[in-house]
Image (spheres, helix red, strand yellow):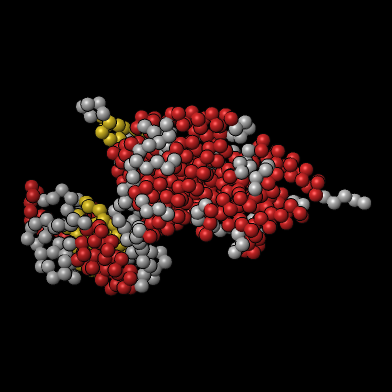
């Protein structure tokens, strides 16, 4: 059950909308289900009642104040909606909901003779609208401080008592939802996303891995976003707002959104806190660039994802520690990695990665303050991904993308568990939703390279394959039978055989791969172990692959029995 509260200044206009057909003729049988005294006129069911009469009843105390004393926004509007899976409530039940909400929020507390005047209108099966004027019987203004969290808390009680779907309680860190006007504008333009959501994505992707404020604003402008910086008398930037190019209001002025209207952590002071934390320095960046050049045919996107995989795997250990501020910093920075991947992904994976980044955005914030001095390399990983550019369909790129997505999926699952342990229900649910999108992106990215590795594993000579099975039995004696039965063991056997041909100890590699965190939450343990073994042994580099393939062929020839 979801409440939503807004303030307005036109009682008649709101009533006309509620009793009207709706913007898409979606309003059916509008009528009152409850009112402050039980006798308010109902223009929906009473032919002798009019909207003007209902407006006069609600505005009576506001009019008594006179034009000079009346508040500028005296209309309190609260919609309450049930979950799509809930049963249909009767008018009598909705009336009880309305009375409990106005009592909990301070509009009209139980037994208060001076409570505000209000009515509850129902024009659909799944929700009601409560309209109140905020002048009390003694002509004072109602005290509505924290009315929204109080409405939320009362709805949570109703859900539990009535057997409805119990939603997670809010904690005040959620980003603002698009208004109905923004949604209708997006519909008219044929866009699936509102301007607020598009701008939120653009700001996050510009922020991902940025080291300075100027770099952040430069990226925003290069992304084709209108940027308005508020400059103080000293010449310093005091704030910023952004707008979609070509979107104007009725006066022809671009529709700008300030950082706080996009998300609580996108204000300029919060963004500056990120820049104050250690990031990748110029020397490190030059080293990364040199490493990319040294990779030979190993592409920049593959190298960036290879380096990011190690960072992401190591970051999971922070969530198992006792430093909550460091964990909060890692969780926030992980969002930047998701934003960077969404901005550089293949079209086939972009939709899922963008959905994962949007869902994780809610999980990246909590009331635990992130450590400003924490530097676990996660932000630098995002920067390297962006510097590496768009990934391709080449085999090394696909393999490294799958490796990174597998590691990132396990980190996001660990984030969900961390939030749940700290009682952050909204954030835990958001991380779980992000993990589902990441799982789909991983499956798409891993399909081709995993299929190639599986074919290679099935073609291994029998002695080589049996040797890798024995390696697995020694490295994981308690779960070897289950792992050998997984379809992805063929790919793991191929990875171990390649690593062995290069001189690695397969058992040591496997034990090291198993020591990394979060294997218990993986859909396929052998699939994750495959990517980890390949990552540790650096099997994705084309020059290494060529040598490994040649060595494996020589080994197979040596072990093949001669014909008599």
- Residue 270 falls in which quadrant of the image? top left
What residue sits 37% from the left and 53% below the top? 322
The quarter in which the N terminus is drawn is bottom left
Work out whether residue 61 or residue 467 is closer to the camera in this orientation and state it.
467
- Residue 16 falls in which quadrant of the image? bottom left
Asked whether, in this view, residue 500 is left or right of residue 310, the answer is right
What residue sits 61% from the left and 50% below the top? 508
Asked whether, in this view, residue 107 is left or right of residue 353, the answer is left
Measured as percent of width and height from the top left, residue 528 is found at: 57, 53
Q: Is residue 464 visible?
A: yes
Work out whether residue 509 or residue 528 is closer to the camera in this orientation and state it.
509
What residue sits 35% from the left and 58% below the top? 422
Work out whether residue 539 or residue 186 is closer to the camera in this orientation and state it.
539
Measured as percent of width and height from the top left, residue 225 is found at: 39, 34
Answer above or below: position of 512 versus 54.
above
Q: Is residue 120 visible?
A: no
Number of numbered labels in the structure image: 0
Answer above or below: position of 407 versus 297.
below
**Residue extending furthest right?**
564
Work out whether residue 57 or residue 139 is closer to the camera in this orientation and state it.
139
Measured as percent of width and height from the top left, residue 283 is found at: 45, 28
Measured as percent of width and height from the top left, residue 161 is found at: 31, 73
What residue sits 61% from the left and 49% below the top? 509
């Amino acid at each position: 059950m979801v409440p939503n509260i807004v303030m307005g200044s036109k009682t008649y206009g709101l009533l006309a909308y509620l009793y009207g057909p709706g913007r898409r003729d979606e309003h059916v049988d509008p009528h009152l289900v409850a009112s402050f005294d039980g006798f308010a006129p109902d223009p929906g069911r009473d032919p002798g009642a009019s909207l003007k009469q209902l407006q006069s009843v609600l505005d009576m105390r506001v009019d008594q104040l006179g034009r000079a004393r009346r508040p500028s926004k005296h209309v309190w509007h609260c919609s309450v909606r049930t979950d799509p899976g809930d049963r249909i409530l009767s008018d009598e039940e909705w009336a009880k909901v309305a009375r409990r909400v106005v009592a909990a929020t301070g509009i009209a507390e139980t037994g208060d003779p001076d409570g505000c005047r209000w009515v509850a209108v129902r024009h659909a099966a799944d929700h009601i609208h409560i309209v109140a004027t905020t002048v009390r019987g003694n002509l004072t203004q109602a005290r509505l401080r924290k009315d929204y969290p109080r409405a939320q808390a009362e709805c949570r009680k109703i859900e539990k008592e009535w057997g409805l779907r119990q939603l997670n309680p809010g904690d005040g860190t959620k980003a603002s939802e698009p208004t109905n006007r923004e949604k209708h504008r997006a519909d008219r333009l044929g866009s699936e996303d509102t301007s607020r959501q598009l701008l939120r994505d653009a700001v996050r992707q510009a922020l991902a891995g940025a080291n300075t404020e100027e770099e952040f604003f430069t990226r925003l402008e290069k992304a084709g976003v209108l940027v308005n910086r508020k400059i103080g008398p000293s010449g310093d930037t005091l704030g910023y707002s952004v707008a979609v190019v070509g979107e104007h209001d009725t006066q022809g002025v671009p529709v700008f959104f300030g950082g706080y209207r996009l998300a609580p952590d996108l204000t300029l002071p919060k963004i500056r806190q990120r820049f104050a934390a250690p990031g990748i320095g110029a020397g490190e960046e030059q080293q990364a660039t040199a490493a990319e050049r040294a990779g030979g045919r190993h592409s920049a996107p593959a190298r960036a994802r290879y380096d990011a995989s190690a960072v992401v795997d190591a970051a999971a250990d922070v969530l198992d520690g006792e430093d909550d501020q460091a964990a909060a910093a890692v969780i926030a920075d992980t969002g930047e990695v998701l934003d960077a991947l969404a901005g550089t992904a293949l079209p086939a994976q972009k939709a899922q990665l963008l959905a994962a980044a949007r869902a994780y955005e809610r999980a990246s914030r909590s009331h635990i303050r992130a450590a400003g001095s924490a530097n676990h390399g996660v932000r630098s990983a995002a920067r390297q991904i962006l510097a590496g550019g768009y990934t391709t369909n080449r085999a090394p790129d696909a393999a490294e993308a799958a490796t990174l997505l597998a590691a990132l999926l396990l980190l996001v699952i660990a984030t969900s568990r961390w939030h749940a342990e700290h009682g952050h229900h909204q954030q835990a649910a958001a991380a779980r939703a992000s993990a589902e999108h990441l799982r789909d992106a991983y499956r798409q990215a891993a399909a081709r390279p995993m299929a190639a590795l599986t074919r290679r594993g099935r073609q291994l000579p029998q002695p080589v394959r049996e040797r890798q099975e024995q390696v697995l039995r020694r490295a994981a004696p308690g779960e070897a039978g289950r792992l050998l039965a997984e379809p992805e063991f063929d790919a793991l056997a191929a990875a171990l055989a390649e690593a062995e041909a290069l001189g690695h100890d397969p058992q040591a590699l496997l034990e090291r791969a198993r020591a990394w965190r979060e294997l218990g939450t993986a859909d396929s343990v052998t699939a994750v172990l495959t990517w980890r073994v390949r990552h540790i042994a650096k099997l994705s580099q084309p020059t290494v692959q060529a040598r490994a393939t040649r060595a494996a062929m020589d080994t197979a020839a040596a072990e093949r029995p001669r014909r008599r």
